[in-house]
Amino acid sequence: MKARTLLVIALSAAVPALACAKKPKVVEQAAAPVETVVEEEPVITQECMAKISLVHENVKNKQYADAYPTWLEVYNECPNANKSIYTNGAKIVDYLYDQATDPAEKERLGKLAVEMCDKRIKYFGSDPKYPVAYILGEKGLAYCDHSENDQVKAVAYPWLKESVEKMGLGSKILVLRKLFEVSYNLYKSDAAQYGEQFMADYALTSGLLQQMAANPANKNATAAGQQKEYIDNLFAISGAASCDKLDALYADYVAQNTQNMENLLKLIALYKRVNCTESEVYFAASEAAHKLQPSEESAAGCARMCMKKEDWRGAINYYNEAIALIEEDDDDDRDDYLYYIAYIYMDKLKNYPEARRYARQSLEVLPNQGRCYLLIGMCYAGSHPYSTDEYPAAKAAILNKTVFWAAVDQFVKAKSVDATCEADANKLIAAYSKYFPTKEEMFDLPNEFGGGTFIVGGWIGERTICRPQK
């Protein structure tokens, strides 16, 4: 009788192994019903329990290779005797998989890791603490960890998704991360087909991790916060995030976190990474963070908000505040902030001396910025340092053309230090060279232009070479 029972169990245990022999399609996995409970008496013999105990001791001592033969006997002979067959089995198979060098052996162990989850569902799917949904998450992880040749891991997606949807805040953090990674892989393989799904998976996984991280009673709160940042970063570089979609996800989030500095700063950083710094949600987060505790990030966000509202003075003040709040030895954004101030002074306020001052400060932080030299050249080109109060009108008109010499000098400098500016610099050189003094005009002012060099007057004060318009 005992032999017959064991034969039946052995035959039933072989079914999952046969099912795994052929790689299933994603749709089939998603639609396949999951068997949760088998109505049969547990095979609990004295010999079986002794072997289970021996396996447990070996695993406890990390003697996984020694544990394997006995574990395999228990797994095949009495698979419904104890849940530890599967928890210890996962550790044993993981170890052997990592040690294996033969591709065929790795493939066998990989299939065994997935099959174990099917068997666990069959015999222990009714466990209230670790139900079918939880085990499906383990199955997804098992497949992803043991399928090196499958880059996308699409087979695991429906298992991971069902696990997260049903387990919710009870989801394993690694399952949340893996679901998003597989969703990311699918999106990268076909953005048109998986774009909306990817956005939904981001909202689901990021939202659950955020709630876990915010719960002080959750012992895994720190790990959840770290994984949230990882998911946010992956989402940011995916290219799927349009600013409108981000706003739809985070509009309420900002309102709920106006007093949470940490969450606000993380959101601000996310919006910067995806270049959505013109968003109203980004502005709201920056303003709320700045009220709580002024920081470089929040000040820069408020500056951008002022720029959008054409509050130029307000933008300058906030950018200067952002510069003052930069930590010592951290110049990552200082050159940008200084350049933005220079741009406002040049383009919006027409205060060319101040524009040059800030552009030069930006160059002190990061030399060889062609954009700064272009900006300074534009300031020179827009100036009229010689007034008719000091010179006859005709002479002042000629002298004011010398600003174009100084401007072109800056354009030439821009392309010499920064190849990315060459095209713009060449266009500006061609445009403003047309306004150089003519030969006749230079001949009319021998005292000023006879020496071959000239110092452009007024606030400019630049020495340049005299050359006529061609």
Image (cartoon, helix red, strand yellow):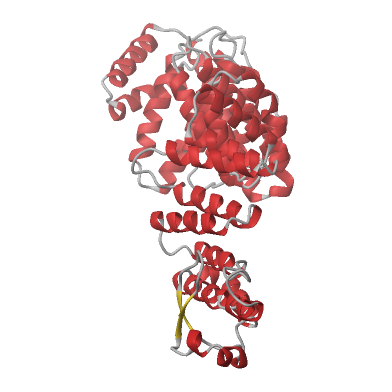
In the rendered image, the vertical position of residue 214 relative to residue 352, given as above or below: above
Residue found at x 55% / y 51%: 340
Work out whether residue 399 or residue 172 is closer to the camera in this orientation and state it. 399
Work out whether residue 255 or residue 361 is closer to the camera in this orientation and state it. 361
Quadrant assignment, res 186: top right
Residue found at x 39% / y 20%: 88
Q: Position of residue 409 (x, y in %)?
A: 50, 76
Q: Position of residue 390 (x, y in %)?
A: 57, 71
Can you see residue 36? yes
In the rendered image, the vertical position of residue 100 relative to residue 68, given as above or below: below
Q: Which quadrant would the C terminus be assigned to in this image?
A: bottom right
In the image, taking residue 75 as reference, residue 13 lies left or right, namely: right
Work out whether residue 8 or residue 429 is closer to the camera in this orientation and state it. 429
Residue found at x 55% / y 63%: 375
Q: Position of residue 43 (x, y in %)?
A: 48, 10
The total of numbered circles placed on residues is: 0
Q: Position of residue 207 (x, y in %)?
A: 61, 24
In the rendered image, the vertical position of residue 362 relative to residue 452, given as above or below: above
Can you see residue 20? no
